[in-house]
Image (tube, helix red, strand yellow):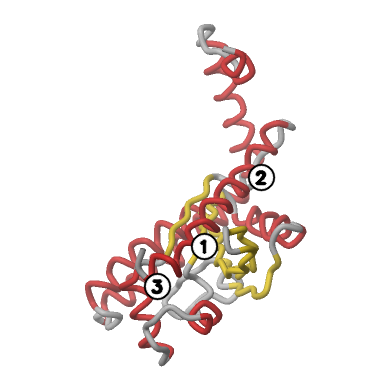
Amino acid sequence: MGQWEIFLSPYKQAVDELKVKLKGMRSQFGIVNANSPIEFVTGRVKPLASIYDKTLEKGLSFEPSKQLGDELGDIAGLRIMCQFVDDISTVTELIRQRKDMRVVEERDYITHNKPSGYRSYHMIVEYPVETIQGKKLVLAEIQIRTLAMNFWASIEHSLNYKYKGMFPEEIKNRLQSAAEAAFRLDEEMSSIRSEIQEAQAYFSEYKEASNPNLLSEKERDIK
């Protein structure tokens, strides 16, 4: 096993465990028949090429070390998608209250979006991983955003690779306009939130009623 594989192993474990726990939060809302503020959860360990780029940016040595783990808080990354902007504050508060991780930093790019138009809420948490060598504390970044914010960020990320961060002025202006349009969409959807959730609940009930052969989750578990 190489040095990098050994170094990144706890981060991979942290991502796997945190994905299960964050998805578990979503499931708990369903159990009590409440609308979940979490739509879905994804996670990844930062690729070596991206770690290398960050070390150049921060003037760090590109080698596995405690300093690297302390300086790069997003080697382990989780992303939580929400339907509505208001759900983001609900999710952040749920994370703050957890006892199995400790929030060490928060960055609000929703209230104070980046000049590019980027919006998201970032939390850096310290998470304990149990390894065969004992407990290891690793940092993980949790990004919380709406589906519209995520769509914009995904497009901007792809274009950023193409232009190496040096966007043509026309593309830059269009991206900023698109970011504002996406945020206006989020605000519009939030204004009719209750109607949307009622429609979603009705649709779910209709599907179950029109498909009598569907087994409940409990029945499937028994079988």
Task: Find numbered disc 1 in the image and state the secondary structure of the residue it sits on.
Answer: helix
Q: Earlier in the sequence, mark 2 or mark 3?
A: 2
Inter-mark Cα distance, 1 to 2 = 22 Å
Contact? badges 1 and 3 (CB < 8 Å): no
Give how far apart the Cα atoms at labels 1 and 3 are.
37 Å
Q: Please name the amino acid that badge 2 sits on.
A: Met
**Quick check: marks 1 and 2 in contact, CB under 8 Å?**
no
For label 3, the crowd category at 10 Å Cα-Cα, with few meaning under 14, some 14 to 19 and many 20 or more, is some
Task: Determine whether, in the image, residue 70 is placed left or right of residue 62.
Answer: right
Q: Nearer the viewer, mark 2 or mark 3?
A: 2
Residue flagged by tag 3: what amino acid is it? Gln
The picture places residue 132, in percent across and down from the top left corner, at: 57, 58
Q: Position of residue 154 (x, y in %)?
A: 37, 61
Precedes in sequence: disc 1 or disc 2:
1
Provide the secondary structure element on which disc 3 rests.
helix
The image quarter containing residue 90 is bottom right
Q: Residue at x 46, y 71 (%)?
A: 118
For the residue pair 87 and 139, the one nearer the viewer reads as: 139
Instruction: Kindly give the residue lying farthest to the top in the view shown.
Output: 212
Front label number (1 vs 2): 1
Q: Which mark is residue 176?
A: 3
**Residue at the image position 46 percent from the left and 62 percent from the top:** 9
List the residue tagged with mark 1. 10
- On residue 25, the disc is 2
Q: Quadrant of the C terminus?
A: top right
Instruction: Judge depth for marks 1 and 3 and give the one in front.
Output: 1
Residue 38 placement (x, y as % from top left): 60, 47
Mark 1 crowd level (few <14, some 14–19, many ≥20, 10 Å Cα)? many
Type of amino acid at the residue the image marks with label 1: Pro
202 in relation to 119, above or below? above
Q: How packed is label 2: few (under 14 Cα within 10 Å), some, or many (20 or more)?
A: some
Check if mark 2's residue and mark 3's residue have beta carbons within 8 Å: no
